[in-house]
Image (cartoon, rainbow, N blue to C red):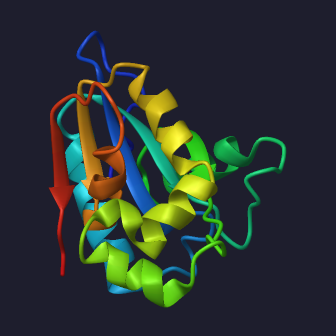
Amino acid sequence: MAPIVPAVAPARGTCLVVTGLALDDLAASRHGIYQRFRMLTEAMAQTGLALELICAQGKVISADAPQACAAVEAEILKHWGIACRVLALTHTVPDIRMPFLLQQIGACVSHTWGPGFRAAKAGGQLQQLQSALDRRPTLVFAHRLANMARLLACRDLPPCVFDMDD
């Protein structure tokens, strides 16, 4: 098991980690993308910045459940040995006002017209991201391109890095 990384860093700031992965059942989540995300999150923790995380709502823990964020924090600490503060569990709501095919075609023109972005916006993800950014993180790590695209819709971005695994 990896060493436990403190959740609070002295005056160095925070790193906001944004992912579309559900992290509520890490014992069952063995797919390679989870292993890659774990490796990258460990690297972010080694910067000395305190980790704050936004991830997707999973099947085990509902975002509406009491102490949902604390339960995901405990799951990450138990299985990965990484201490972090989970700020939000996000979900998507498909936009049914426009046919999916037209959304796909629109994504060729702008990422904001694509079905993933529209579903994230309808699900409240953009507001959750902006709230997290209003906390003034020192660094933002976007896991995968779709999350970076969502961050680009926010204001006052600090330095950002993203992982484009595909």
The answer to whether 63 appears left or right of 49 in the picture is right
Question: In the figure, 28 relative to 63: above or below?
Answer: below
The quarter of the rendered structure image containing the C terminus is: bottom left
Q: Nearer the viewer, residue 130 or 108?
A: 108
Residue 17 screen position, x and y as percent: 35, 45
The residue furthest bottom is 101
Residue 144 seen anywhere in this rendered image of the structure = no
At 43% across and 21% down in the image, what residue appears? 134
Q: Nearer the viewer, residue 41 or 82?
A: 41
Residue 24 screen position, x and y as percent: 62, 64
At 41% across and 47% down in the image, what residue appears? 82
The answer to whether 64 appears left or right of 89 in the picture is right
Q: Nearer the viewer, residue 19 or 131?
A: 131
Residue 45 screen position, x and y as percent: 27, 41
Q: Nearer the viewer, residue 37 or 158?
A: 158
The residue furthest top is 11
The answer to whether 95 appears left or right of 44 in the picture is right
Residue 79 screen position, x and y as percent: 50, 62
Question: In the figure, 155 relative to 103: above or below?
Answer: above
The quarter of the rendered structure image containing the N terminus is: bottom left
Number of callouts in the render?
0
Q: Which image quarter: residue 61?
A: bottom right
Q: Which image quarter: residue 143?
A: bottom left
At 46% across and 90% down in the image, what residue appears? 101
Residue 89 seen anywhere in this rendered image of the structure = yes
At 39% across and 43% down in the image, what residue appears? 4
Question: In the figure, 58 relative to 100: above or below?
Answer: above
